[in-house]
Image (cartoon, rainbow, N blue to C red):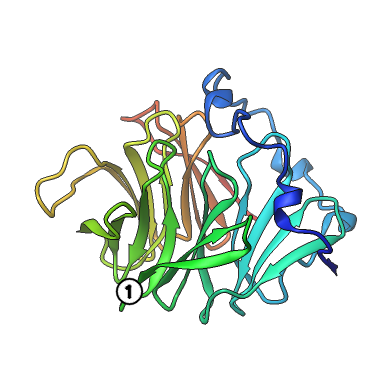
Amino acid sequence: MAQASHSITETLGGTKGERFLNDANFKEGKKESSSLRLESLRLDPENIARVVPGRITDVRFFPSNSVKMIVAGDKLENIGFWNVGQSEVHLYCPHQAPISGISIQPHCLSKIYTSCYGGIVRLMDAEKEIFDLVVDSDECIYTLSQPTNEANCLYFAEGSGGLTIWDNRIGKRSSHWALHRKRINTIDFNCENPHIVATSSSDGTACIWDLRYTDGDILSPLRIFTHERGLQSAYFSPSGCSLATTRCCVIHVTDLDQWEKAFVVVDFLY
């Protein structure tokens, strides 16, 4: 695909002040329908684009109704921006290790956090097209995320099973918990209750936590979902009523309203 001939800020133009996909739009909706049959989905070759030159390690959609843009990071240290359906790609190389995480501030689309396995977190200013250093850790950083109600705090998986809160106002860690025996692969906040967070880990568990209830350095899970192998991800549905977890070749969907019943509702092979 062609390199971009205009700035990324021009592409993002016209998104200020709008309502975002992970905010009020979902709160007004009903619980998701389960009528979709995954086997009916098809991938059209015309809808395939090479956004970055290497294997993609993380990808995010911009939380916007007016712009269909994705940002992807790869194993070769690249960050690529693609306005879906267009031929141009904005490509950057701000890190010196494979990209491990991307987080877009939902109320300021020109601010994008990126992390790499080298322990670095940078904040991109899309208007200036620069990546400022935010965190320089001695530990690997495996993923990062932000709740919609905390613009000044960044959450990232650090080291073997650790979850760190970084406060940008003071420029240092405000909290750190050892939550899993092995690395955390994803951090996801419930859009209906942003103090509720789900983590997935290579130790084969996904956990749901309430960040309001801590005992010093100890955070106890509300629920633990155990799998036979390490998990690649755990994400809430837009309504917050379901949790999808993935491991090799299997997607588990858990109905959180059925708290005391069987947690795995359906498995999909992909």
Name which quarter of the figure residue 194 lies in.
Answer: top left
The amino acid sitting under disc 1 is: Ser
- Give the camera-side residue of 242 and 192: 192
- Quadrant of the image for the C terminus? bottom right
Residue ID at (90%, 56%): 46
Q: Position of residue 10 (x, y in %)?
A: 75, 50
Asked whether the viewer can see residue 204, the reply is no
- Give the camera-side residue of 217 and 250: 217
Instruction: Residue at the far right: name it.
Output: 46
Name which quarter of the figure residue 133 lies in.
Answer: bottom left
Residue ID at (35%, 67%): 183
- Quadrant of the image for the N terminus? bottom right
Q: Position of residue 2 (x, y in %)?
A: 86, 68
Mark count? 1
Q: Position of residue 171 (x, y in %)?
A: 30, 60
Task: Residue under label 1, please give it.
Answer: 137
- Give the camera-side residue of 173 and 241: 173
Q: Is residue 194 left or right of residue 266?
A: left
SS at mark 1 in the image? loop
Residue ID at (51%, 36%): 237
Tell me if mark 1 has few (under 14), some (14-19) or many (20+) residues whose alpha carbon lies within 10 angstroms of its own: some
Asked whether the viewer can see residue 149, the reply is yes
- Give the camera-side residue of 254 and 184: 184
